[in-house]
Amino acid sequence: MSGRRAGWLGIVFVVLLLLQAGMADIPTLDTPIDRIQHFYAQHGGIIVTAQIIGVIAAIVFLMFAWALAPGVNPGSEPAASRLRVAAALVALASVVTAIPPLWLALS
């Protein structure tokens, strides 16, 4: 993949991440349960959309990191492999953390 294409993937990732982060202010642990339930009941569609955008952003991030891996340390396959593994773990963590808000919004 060309450097220009990898750059565009990075830009798309940042835009998706900012879009997802700005869609909803999810309640924290300090928020009373009844307010959390009310929030998820009132904003379910926005939360689902934000989490789907987050999952798409994780996939784009993985593609971005994969495209950058060969240029990390040319000639060093272990460095590229470590970057790919780290990116896969970050993307997996992002997808896994999207499950609880999706579950709450859909229930």
Image: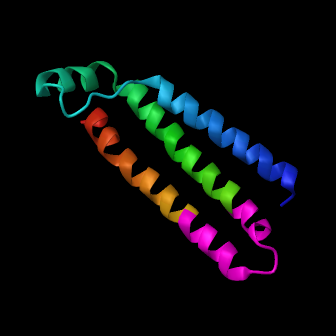
Q: Main secondary structure of the magenta part?
A: helix
Residue 101 in picture, x, y percent from top left: 32, 39
In the displayed structure, would residue 106 be above or below residue 39? below
Residue 8 appears in which quarter of the rendering?
Answer: top right
Residue farthest front in this picture = 73
Relative to 75, is 28 on the left or the right? left
Residue 84 appears in which quarter of the rendering?
Answer: bottom right
Relative to 38, is 105 on the left or the right? right
Q: Which residue is drawn at 37% across and 49% down?
A: 97
Q: Nearer the viewer, residue 44 or 66?
A: 66
Residue 28 in picture, x, y percent from top left: 25, 31
In the displayed structure, would residue 73 be above or below residue 67? below
Residue segment shown in magenta: 66-86
Residue 74 appears in which quarter of the rendering?
Answer: bottom right
Residue 90 in picture, x, y percent from top left: 50, 58
Q: Which residue is drawn at 42% across and 25% down?
A: 46
